[in-house]
Amino acid sequence: MGIKASGARHSCRAASPRRKGAGQECPAHYRRVLLFIALLLSALSWPASGARAAAAEAAGLGPYPPLSAVYEEISALASAHPELASLEVIGQSVEGRPIYAFHIGRQDGQRRPEALLTADIHAGEVLSSRVALGAATRLLEDDGKDPWITSLLDRTDFWIVPVLNPDGYNRVIVTGGKGGDIGTRRNAHGVDLNRNYTLAPGAHSRHPLAGNRRPRSQYYMGPGELSEPETSAIAVLADSHDFYVSISGHTVAGKFLYPYCFTKRAAPDREAFIRAGQAFAARQPRVKYKVQQSYSWYPTLGDMDDFLYLRHGVMSFTVEHGKVAHNLKYALAHRPVMFWVMNPIDADQWVMNDRDALLAAVEEALELTGGKPLPLPVPAAAAGQ
Ligand SMILES: [Zn+2]
């Protein structure tokens, strides 16, 4: 629209009375009309969109802050607790934004088992970032005050990645929740990051949500496995640590999902997965989520959970924070509807509902695994290692 506006001004300038014989072609009232149209188009065009984007970036969306504020929050939390927290950059997004990980653990030279919590792999599922930051805050502020938290930190080191898809997060906020050209799910290359991990051996599916080879699909798997800097960052992190558990935050189905994601076959560690899920739900004070195998909801290919489980023996879970039914009334009365379907207006209620549950699942996994990765469920050769 900015181009049209300047075009309108140009046509009038070309017909200016200062130019020989042009006065007849562009009488004063036409010039006024053209000027009005040009001003109108300018008002609707890029500068205003930019202003709207800047306003959205400054304000965030309801309880969901802009990315810059999330980064400030992360940095302030880390510097307020230097005895426990350090902030590490584990990679850079397509657009060069840092992917931060909180490393939260006692700095006493002792090696402890390691747990991984990630959030917002899907751009518009921003509640997950609030829950991950809620869990980080709980650990940092209640160590030494709450015996359960103190004991957890005596036994585990946490790595918490509050925004795994920062380009997507930023785009969702500056577009007022719509996401722009890549929608509300993918990274800046248009790849669904949770379909971009190494495929499980023999994985295939025709389910419409499972993963798609067409770049225009919301479920685009990317040009190759781990082609994206965001998924590579997790792969490198998993290579250089011995995580015994991983929980990836999404919204909004109210579920605790465990592998396998790519097949209906039961994983050898299924019983242990269910126990971790039960420990999660038992700690939810208000709304308890359903524990189920990921595949039985719908199959996914190149999912982070299968990757971490098959390649690294990590007990890997997905939590779908929130409930559509709870969000619907507010969402139907506000725009964009889909953003508010995916993210509740009362984010804090859900942070309180889920943050201790995350830590309880980590604790149960610690007891089930002894703090070590599980034996690989598929022989390494078959898993393509
Ligand atoms: Zn998701």
Image (spheres, grey):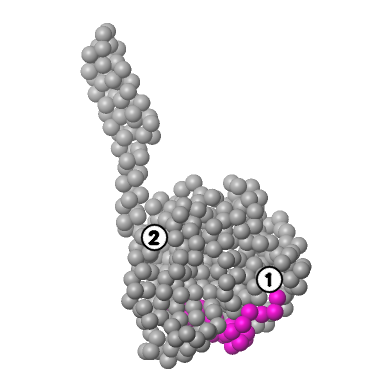
Closer-to-camera residue (222/95): 95
Q: Which residues are magenta?
A: 349-376
- Magenta region, mostly helix, strand or loop? helix
> Where residue 310 is drawn, which disc sits there?
1
| Vertical side of 109 occupied by 251: above or below | above
Residue 300 % position (x, y): 65, 62
Q: Secondary structure at mark 1?
A: helix
Label 2: which residue? Answer: 67
Q: Quadrant of residue 31?
A: top left
Residue 158 % position (x, y): 49, 78
**Is residue 261 in view from this perspective?**
yes
Residue 121 % position (x, y): 52, 62
- Tally of marks: 2
Residue 101 % position (x, y): 46, 69
- Pick the quarter of the image with the C terminus: bottom right
Residue drawn at (68%, 71%), measured in percent from left and top? Answer: 310
Q: Secondary structure at mark 2?
A: helix
Estimate the spatial distance between the alpha carbons at disc 1 and disc 2, rounded to whole Å.
32 Å
Closer-to-camera residue (145/110): 110
Disc 1 or 2, which lies upstream in sequence? 2
| Vertical side of 361 occupied by 151: above or below | below
Residue drawn at (53%, 84%), measured in percent from left and top? Answer: 112
Q: Amino acid at mark 1?
A: Leu
Residue drawn at (72%, 75%), measured in percent from left and top? Answer: 377
| Vertical side of 148 occupied by 308: above or below | above
Q: Is residue 184 magenta?
A: no
Residue drawn at (43%, 53%), measured in percent from left and top? Answer: 171
